[in-house]
Structure formats: structure tokens, C-alpha cells
Image: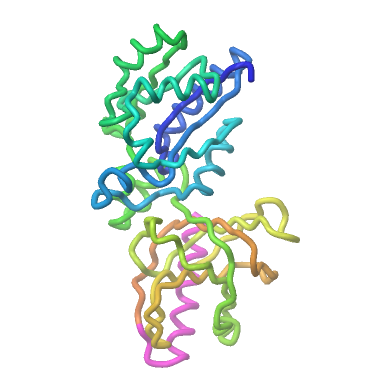
């Protein structure tokens, strides 16, 4: 390896602040004919050092890899975060990055810290850089109305159903990646066929349950590479049928293909209503038609 321009962190959400860091990594890598590398962690460090404080995740590892690769990063490295890694001080961390990845330049966010106790702040890393002969670049915060964009504020917005703010800070609608599994087949009998996603990883942050207008990217056989469809999704229980388990069930507009076993990306666009029980099948079908019209109107804006 000729050497690497590297950045290190959890990068949960891959929001606009993270994207600015990666843009600097790729710019410097091209300029120096070096490899662009992102090193991230799984599980989230807090899940190891303070499990009670560990947040729900905006991006699971596979979702994060897709987003990072789309930013032009050449190597995506997941470092298992273990109690041993948690005890590494900043100097040991830097030594590891230099030895394992031939780090020539390190790009950091303005508030980043790594190593035991997050002691590896910008000032300490710049001192280490002089002894280990690598360069350090610091990327300033990306702000919205004066507030730095962060994973924490995005998690709060999503948990409270503020998808509009979350999308603005992420630079895209918030989404989930999942595999299509077989459901009860009930939707097809009422004229609204659906695809069912496998139960989401318990670590994944979901917005409040409800019926949503969504965008769905299909990447399976016969659908084209990254074909995008609008749709509506029921997220939550199905009280009309006495089912209390949360499901993610999507009705795709203008699509009637076979996608069982395929992986899809679903983006929440707008919450249309809460989950509710209906007195009859006809009442449910009538409401679903209203939902379909509302979802189409939302997606056509």
C-alpha cells in the first residue's frame, strides 16, 4: 500500500457533517495518490463502555457501508469495538492506524476524540503527528441555523417524528435497509399487495409507529439497478387483525413484481396517520385507499 488518508469514528447516520469529512478525505487522497480509508466501529463504543447510555443507531453497519462507498471512499473498515480496544490510549490508537493502514494523513471532525476517555483530541493528535510523521486536517462543523449537525440531534428528531428536519440534516430521507420476507398474503386479497420486511435489528432507531409515505429502492433481479418506487408503509401492529407484533409492511405503487428474499432500502418521507383498528374489512379498505391517495400526493410534491 502506498499510504492512506484516513478518518476514524462511529459516523452514525452519515449526515452532512460526516459527508464534509469524507469529502476532505477523498480530496486529499486524490491529490496525494493515496488510498482513502474510513475506519469505524461495531458495536457502538458506548455499548461497550456504558451500555445504559448506548443510543439507538441511525445506520447499521451494512447501511453505513453503502453510504460511505457512495461518497467515494475506497476502503471501509469495521473495527470490532471490544473492551481491549476501549482501553487503548490515543497514542496506541495512532500507532495502530499508522502500522495497519500506512496512514499518511488523518482527517478529523472539529469535535472528534478517540482513544481511552476520548483523550485523542485535535491538539494531542497534532502533537503525535509530529513524532509519527503524518499530517492532520481538521474539518469544521456543518451547521444549520447556527447549530452543528450531529447524530444526537438527528436521533432526537427521528424519535419525535420530525422527519423533515432529519432529512435536512442527513442530506436525504431517513431510511432502513431490509430483506423481503413472506407475510400472511392478506394485502393481496384486499387489492393492496404488500412486501414485508424482516423484523428490524433491535439497535435500529425507528420513527413513531404509523402509516407513512415512503420511497423504496429495489436492487433485485428484474427491477433494474436501484429502481425507485413510491409507496406507503404500515409500521407497527395490525390491531384490526389482532396482531400486536410490530411489522414493516409496504405497498409499492405501480409495481407487481416478485421480490421475496431481495434486499430493499425504504425511506420514510412523511407520517400520514397513527396505527388504528377498524371495525370492518370495508372500513380498512376505504382508509387504505385514502392513505394511498395521500401518499401519492406527498411523493408528487
Q: Which residue is drawn at 53% across and 37% down?
A: 68
- Classify the position of the N terminus by image quarter: top right
Hey, which residue is sitting farthest right in the picture? Answer: 222
Is 80 situated left or right of 143 in this image?
right
> Where does the image place residue 123, in percent across and percent down from the top left?
29, 15
Residue 285 % position (x, y)? 49, 84
Name which quarter of the figure residue 151 lies in. top left
Q: Please tell me which residue lies in front, 59 or 290.
A: 59
Point 25% across, 46% down: residue: 50
Residue 222 shown left or right of residue 93 in the figure: right
Tell me if residue 186 comes above or below residue 43 in the rendering.
below
115 and 214: which is toward the camera: 115
Q: Dominant secondary structure of the magenta stretch?
A: helix
Asked whether residue 297 appears in the rendered view, the answer is yes
Q: Is residue 189 magenta?
A: no
* Quadrant position of residue 182: bottom right
**Left or right: residue 73 compared with residue 168:** right
The furthest residue to the bottom: 280
Question: How many numbered circles are shown?
Answer: 0
The answer to whether residue 112 of the structure is visible from this angle is: no
Q: x, y (%) of residue 265?
A: 55, 56
Q: Which residue is drawn at 67% across and 71% down?
A: 256
Task: Tell me where the magenta segment starts and ends, as one range.
Answer: 277-301
Residue shown at 58% from the left, 71% from the top: 181
Of all residues, the one furthest to the front in this rendering is 84
Amino acid at each position: 500500500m502506498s499510504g492512506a488518508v484516513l478518518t476514524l469514528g462511529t459516523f452514525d447516520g452519515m449526515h452532512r457533517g460526516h459527508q464534509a469529512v469524507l469529502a476532505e478525505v477523498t480530496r486529499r487522497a486524490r491529490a496525494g495518490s493515496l488510498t482513502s480509508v474510513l475506519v469505524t466501529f461495531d458495536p457502538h463504543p458506548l455499548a461497550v463502555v456504558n451500555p445504559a447510555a448506548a443510543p439507538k443507531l441511525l445506520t447499521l453497519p451494512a447501511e453505513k457501508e453503502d453510504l460511505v462507498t457512495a461518497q467515494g471512499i475506497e476502503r471501509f473498515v469495521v473495527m470490532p469495538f471490544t473492551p481491549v480496544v476501549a482501553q487503548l490510549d490515543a497514542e496506541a490508537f495512532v500507532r495502530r492506524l499508522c502500522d495497519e493502514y500506512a496512514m499518511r494523513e488523518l482527517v478529523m471532525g472539529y469535535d472528534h476524540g478517540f482513544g481511552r476517555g476520548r483523550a485523542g483530541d485535535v491538539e494531542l493528535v497534532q502533537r503525535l503527528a509530529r513524532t509519527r510523521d503524518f499530517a492532520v486536517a481538521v474539518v469544521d462543523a456543518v451547521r444549520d441555523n447556527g447549530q452543528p449537525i450531529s447524530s444526537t440531534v438527528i436521533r432526537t428528531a427521528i424519535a419525535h417524528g420530525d422527519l423533515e428536519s432529519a432529512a435536512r440534516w442527513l442530506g436525504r430521507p431517513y431510511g432502513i435497509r431490509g430483506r423481503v420476507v413472506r407475510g400472511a398474503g392478506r394485502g393481496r386479497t384486499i387489492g393492496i399487495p404488500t412486501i414485508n420486511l424482516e423484523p428490524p435489528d433491535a439497535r435500529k432507531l425507528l420513527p413513531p409507529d404509523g402509516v407513512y409515505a415512503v420511497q423504496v429502492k429495489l436492487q433485485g433481479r428484474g427491477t433494474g439497478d436501484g429502481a425507485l418506487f413510491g409507496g406507503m408503509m404500515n409500521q407497527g401492529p395490525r390491531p384490526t387483525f389482532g396482531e400486536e407484533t410490530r411489522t414493516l409492511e409496504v405497498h409499492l405503487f405501480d409495481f407487481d413484481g416478485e421480490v421475496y428474499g431481495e434486499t430493499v432500502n425504504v425511506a420514510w418521507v412523511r407520517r400520514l396517520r397513527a396505527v388504528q383498528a377498524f371495525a370492518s374489512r370495508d372500513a380498512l379498505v376505504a382508509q387504505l385507499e385514502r392513505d394511498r391517495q395521500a401518499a401519492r400526493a406527498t411523493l408528487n410534491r
